[in-house]
Image (spheres, rainbow, N blue to C red):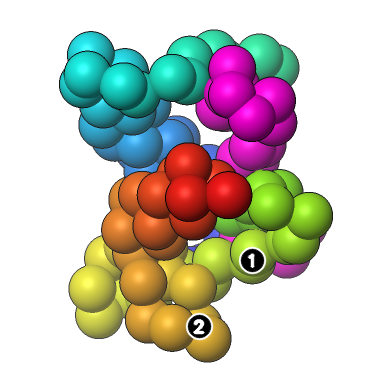
């Protein structure tokens, strides 16, 4: 990623795609969460058990950060895949968030 403008474009596109994905998932039976956008961040709010996931772009380090399940997940841009990836597992933003949602439901 060469500069902040390029990061912002990539992060905005990734968050828009994630938001659309989550809105579709909200309609699933038993979803029990809502998505809201607030000041450039996405929040995933759960009814039972109560919880909040926060997904935010972090321009200074050119990452997308997820705060969920009492942990922080920092995703880096993969120029080959043209997606934000969680380096520890290789998961994309959507795949990681889907997994975290399922883990939250299982608790």
Task: Please indicate whether residue 96 sits to the left or right of residue 66 in the image.
Answer: left
Numbered-mark total: 2
| Rendered residue at 58%/49% (across/down) | 107
| Rendered residue at 48%/50% (across/down) | 106
Task: Please indicate whether residue 64 sits to the left or right of residue 78 in the image.
Answer: right
Q: Earlier in the sequence, mark 2 or mark 1?
A: 1
The numbered mark at residue 22 is: none
Percent position of residue 87, x then y: 50, 83
Taking depth in this image into account, of 2 and 74 the one nearest to the observer is 74
| Rendered residue at 43%/83% (across/down) | 89
Q: Which residue is mark 2?
A: 87
- Residue 43 seen in render: no
Looking at the image, residue 91 lies above or below residue 95: below
Taking depth in this image into account, of 91 and 15 the one nearest to the observer is 91
Secondary structure beneath dot 1 equals strand
- Predominant SS along the magenta part: strand
Question: Magenta residues, as a range?
Answer: 41-63
Q: Quadrant of residue 36?
A: top right
Percent position of residue 75, x then y: 55, 66
Looking at the image, residue 1 lies above or below residue 103: below
Secondary structure beneath dot 2 equals loop
Taking depth in this image into account, of 46 and 42 the one nearest to the observer is 46
Percent position of residue 94, x then y: 33, 50
| Rendered residue at 75%/61% (across/down) | 71
Residue 82 included in the magenta stretch of the image: no
Question: CB of mark 2 within 8 Å of CB of mark 1?
Answer: yes
Q: Quadrant of residue 19?
A: top left
Q: Which residue is mark 1?
A: 74
Residue 62 included in the magenta stretch of the image: yes
Q: CA distance from mark 2 to mark 1?
A: 8 Å
Q: How busy is the neighbourhood of tag 1: few (under 14 within 10 Å), some, or many (20 plus)?
A: many
């Amino acid at each position: 990623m060469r500069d902040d403008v390029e990061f912002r474009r990539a992060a905005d596109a990734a968050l828009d795609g994630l938001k659309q994905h989550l809105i579709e998932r909200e309609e699933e039976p038993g979803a029990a969460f809502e998505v809201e956008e607030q000041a450039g961040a996405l929040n995933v709010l759960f009814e039972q058990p109560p919880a909040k996931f926060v997904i935010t772009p972090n321009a200074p380090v050119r990452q997308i950060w997820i705060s969920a399940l009492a942990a922080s997940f920092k995703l880096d841009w993969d120029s080959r895949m043209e997606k934000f990836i969680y380096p520890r597992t290789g998961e994309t933003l959507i795949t990681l968030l889907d997994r975290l949602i399922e883990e939250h439901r299982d608790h």
